[in-house]
Image (spheres, grey):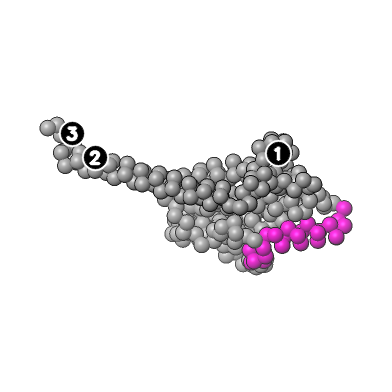
Amino acid sequence: MSETEPSERARARTAFRRAQHRRALLVAGVATAIVLALVAWVVTTAPGWDRAREAFFSPERAVEVLPEVAAGLWLNLRVWLVASVVGLVLGLLLAVVRTSRIPALFPLRMLAIAYVDVFRGVPLLLTLLLVGFGLPALRLTWLPVSAAFLGGLAIVLTYTAYLAEIFRAGIESVHPSQVAAARSLGLSRGRAVRHVVLPQAVRNVTAPVASMLVSLQKDSGLISILGAVDAIRAAQIATTGDYNFTPYVVAGLLFLLISIPLTRLVDAWSARHGWRGGLSTVSGAGGLR
């Protein structure tokens, strides 16, 4: 037998594992099919299924409202992209200020702590209402008062607080010896943070930050409560008069077409880099409201 050829026991072990894998796939497939069939039977045999199918799953109505809802989704995507960039930059700056030990930055550090505590404690929906109706009441001529801008601002205020905590956890995960080693090489504390701590911190929290941005994409739909004509608002307008709620289903499917691939990418990234969700600062979308 060749030195590179596996032994009989190794081949048997490999065959056994493959058989187990095929058996597990078969059991999972059968169980999934049974559950789906049971759900379909419960739904389709419900007394109100005919009415619900007409009110929520009308193909003709879906095709009719798709352009308007898709146009509204484009507003959601723009709010999401801008809020993500601004939130990442401000969140990182807040995290650096909070972890700084420079005495002159003490007032800024206290302000950063207060900001994070306030906007993590206030539900996002309430922040949207306060910003959307409170800022226009000030009548500041230089402040845009469009619903999209005010809604995006409220989302930035909330998500910046969460992102700041994630970045802070990443900064504090870098061992102090890294800074000590950088200082021993002649780097100032600021350069040590910029060139040694921050690159490692950002790399450590890439997965939780990405998860937070996926939640931001979904919550961009909340700007509709201020009157912005996004996907949800467009669907609401389309339901006016005929009380056919198919537009809401269309809007939900469009959001899923974006959020599911993003979620799978984040999961793949997490699995590849061995992240298992250990940072307690990461909160699900439900924790933001």
The image shows residue 58, relative to residue 281, as above or below, that is: above
- Alpha-carbon span between mark 1 and mark 2: 53 Å
Residue flagged by tag 3: what amino acid is it?
Glu
Q: Under tag 2, what secondary structure?
A: helix
Residue at image mark 3: 5
Our reading of the magenta stretch's main secondary structure is helix
Segment colored magenta: 117-141
Q: Which of the two marks, 1 or 3, is nearer to us in this view?
A: 1
- Can residue 119 be spotted in the picture? no
Residue at figure coordinates x 59%, y 56% from the top left: 285
Which residue is painted at 47% across and 56% down in the image? Answer: 277
Mark 1 nearby-residue class (10 Å; few <14, some 14–19, many ≥20): some
Nearest the eye: 59 or 87: 59
Q: Tag on residue 15? A: 2
Would you say 133 lies left or right of 195 here? Answer: right
Q: In the picture, which quadrant includes the N terminus?
A: top left
Q: Toward the viewer: 259 or 30?
A: 30
Q: Residue 235: give x, y in percent of width and height.
A: 72, 45
Which of the two discs, 2 and 3, labels the residue nearer the N terminus? 3
- Going by the numbered disc 2, the residue's amino acid type is Ala
Q: Which quadrant would residue 57 be assigned to in this image?
A: top right
CA–CA distance in space, label 1 to label 3: 63 Å
Query: How far is the residue under mark 2 from the one under mark 3?
Result: 15 Å
SS under mark 3: loop
Give the numbered dot on residue 61: 1
